Amino acid sequence: MNKRLLTFAFLLIAALAKTFACTNLIVGKNASVDGSTIVSYSADSYGMYGYLCHYPAATYSQGTMLDIHEWDTGKYLGKIEQAKRTYNVIGNMNEFQLTIAETTFGGRPELVDSTGIVDYGSLIYITLQRARTAREAIQIMDNLVQEYGYYSSGESFTIADPNEIWVMEMIGKGPGIRGAVWVAVRIPDDCISAHANQSRIHQFNMDDKENCMYSSDVISFAREKKYFNGVNKDFSFADAYAPIDFEARRFCEARVWSFYRMFNPEMDKYLSYIQGTTTEPMPLYIKAPKKISVQDIKNAMRDHYEGTPLDLTKDFGAGPFKSPYRLSPLTFKVGDQQYFNERPISTQQTGFTFVAQMRADKPDAVGGVLWFGMDDANMTVYTPVYCCTDKVPDCYAQGKGDFLTFSWESSFWVFNWVSNMIYPRYSLMIDDMRATQKELENGFNTSQEAIEATATKMLETDPAKAKAFLTNYSGMTAQTTTETWKRLGEFLIVKYNDGVVKRMKNGKFERNSIGQPAPVIRPGYPKDFLEEIAKTTGDRYKVLE
């Protein structure tokens, strides 16, 4: 195989490996309880070490160049000209509350430009350092890929500020062809939306310049490549550049469906689409009958299709303790037949996750909160990180261990330690974790108003002091949560050691009258699982008279 084909094969494999990776949930400001725009994200990639990134605000002299390394692999891609001034970025939010998240849809593999310099991850973080609003971000992203080339496969971006949320979908033009084709649609303020590794923009109103932007050749390029031959009004970005298949429906669109139906039961009608028996796609956005809170979105990120026909806890794969998790890969063979596992919103391979809260009625330093967590969204705690934060909490910092090096100083490893204890005995242990999780998150939610009132008052007289206060608060909550999670892990290993359960009374492990541990509880396996053992093993384990 020649070098060109090897490069293409690598890019194709990389794209396919990431195709089912991430999830974005979106809430417009008039659909939220407090007028926030809300965006969530989970970085779901095996091999990813989770940490909170930081790019401090800076000024640069004319001609300064910026090295670009691919976000996923660290591979050096080239240099671009640095901006004269950059803004403070903490995680995926900058000091003006601008937030950018993504999910990879892959799309047509022949459109990957292996000669491009800017990959999707670099595009996000460079733009966050240069843009103040969502509309400005879209233009900067277009300018960057037109000038330097787009290295990645097809991508859906969520681009949000305190007033607007846009979904932008982009794909390259193939090896050596600089630029990308793209379309961006504004999500109405009273609606919710989502994307999860499948292109979701179909027809769009080319005449609505206020709510739709697109590259000038988005349709003509599709015609040139023979992806589309109809009239303009019928053009579908998704159909042209990322034709859907069974896996895209069941692994990707199903997550969007599950989110929609949490807040609008009428979306149950699209179950047949998810299952592949009908072809009408779900809308890009819908109205929710009730207002949605930031906590609602944190909880939505913990979904495993509970209460739906796709519920992962209800089949044999859940095991004796009703686990909503399945080991990868998503598909497997038995004989010549291909089978699959469901792919829910929450999954064990998450590196980090966030729920971004952006508010136009507050000063930027106070209004933007990146509720951040490490590892599996279902078993993390979202702690507040304010957008003015200029120091990464130590436990969230890069370099506190890595993907192959465990560290008690790393939130990533502490949360993984606890979740990996719970996975095998999920139904026995999950309530203990959930109680601690709720206590912490409810505490942060309750404290939010007072913390922000204090910071807002400080901003009036001493902005630097206010920003230091919020930075310190962000660090304190992260560190306190990590220490609490260590203690939770210690509690769990004592309570459930060796498959038994230690008795508790008044919140403490029970002892007898002379101070010795009370007799343990031996829960064994659930009744339905024991019945299945008897059924499948026949007389093998039958006690003889």
Image: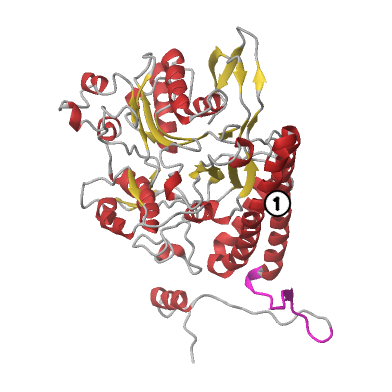
x, y percent for residue 503: 69, 78
* Residue stretch rendered in magenta on the structure: 498-514
Give the residue drawn at x 44%, y 17%. Answer: 143
The N terminus sits in image quarter? top left
Residue at the far left in the pictured view: 230
Circle 1 is placed at which residue position?
482
Total labels: the figure holds: 1
Judge by depth and name the residue closer to the eye, 166 or 457: 457
x, y percent for residue 276: 24, 50
SS for callout 1: helix
Give the residue drawn at x 16%, y 25%. Answer: 229
x, y percent for residue 457: 70, 42
Q: Is residue 79 left or right of residue 104?
A: right
The amino acid sitting under disc 1 is: Thr
x, y percent for residue 493: 69, 64
Q: Is residue 290 visible?
A: yes
Main secondary-structure element of the magenta-colored stretch? loop
Structural crowding at the residue carrying mark 1, measured as other residues with C-alpha within 10 Å and reported as few (<14), some (14–19) or many (≥20): many
Q: Is residue 27 visible?
A: no
Q: Is residue 524 left or right of residue 396?
A: left
Residue at the far right in the pictured view: 514
Judge by depth and name the residue closer to the eye, 19 or 167: 167
Instruction: State whether residue 500 is above or below residue 55.
Output: below
Colour setting = secondary structure
Residue 99 lies in magenta, yes or no? no
Q: Is residue 468 left or right of residue 402?
A: right
Snapshot quadrant of residue 147 = top left
Instruction: State whether residue 499 is above or below residue 248.
Output: below
